[in-house]
Amino acid sequence: MLPVTHYLAFQDGQIIFEEGSTDDSLYVVDYGAVELSKMAKGVKFVIEILQPGYIFGEMAFLSRIPRTATARAVGETSVGIIDRALLDQEYQNLSEQFQTIIETLVLRLQKTTDLLMNSKIDRIDS
């Protein structure tokens, strides 16, 4: 079971966080759904629709980078905020080498997502 500190409720279409923001909370979908999207050249690209039980916000949480996507509620939605202090403690218990591996994976995922977005933008421009 995930260590949720509290829950937040959102109405359909409400923004949970925006791409580029610096909040580093980690979330889990309690009920409803969450759309993850990116904007490029004025076009919104939906990356994924997350269902109950899905965790999101992990990239900013693990690497303390700005949000790489916008999270928006689809329908009435509740998300749990996962306890940062507890997860920080767990993360710090990992070896430095394993922390580096995780951070490398997060940054690689960010680069891959950016490459995919650029590929989609190139197709729009063609």
Image (cartoon, grey):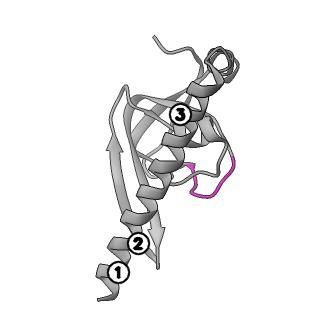
Residue 93 lies, with reference to residue 39, above or below; the image says: above
The CA distance from mark 3 to mark 2 is 26 Å
Left or right, residue 111 beside residue 64: left
Q: What residue is disc 1 on? A: 122
Residue 106 lies, with reference to residue 125, above or below; the image says: above
Tag 1–tag 3 contact (CB < 8 Å): no
Q: What residue is disc 3 on? A: 101
Quadrant (top left, top right, bottom left, bottom right) of the C terminus: bottom left
Q: Is residue 20 magenta?
A: yes
- Measured as percent of width and height from the top left, residue 41 is found at 46, 79
- Mark 1 crowdedness (10 Å alpha carbons): few <14, some 14-19, many ≥20: few
Mark positioned earlier in the residue sequence (3 or 2): 3
Residue 47 lies, with reference to residue 9, above or below; the image says: below
Q: Residue furthest bottom?
A: 126
What is the span of residues highlighted in magenta in the rendered image?
17-22
Question: Which of the numbered marks, if any, corresponds to residue 118?
Answer: 2
- Measured as percent of width and height from the top left, residue 76 is found at 41, 38
- Mark 3 crowdedness (10 Å alpha carbons): few <14, some 14-19, many ≥20: few
Quadrant (top left, top right, bottom left, bottom right) of the N terminus: top left
Left or right, residue 104 beside residue 36: right
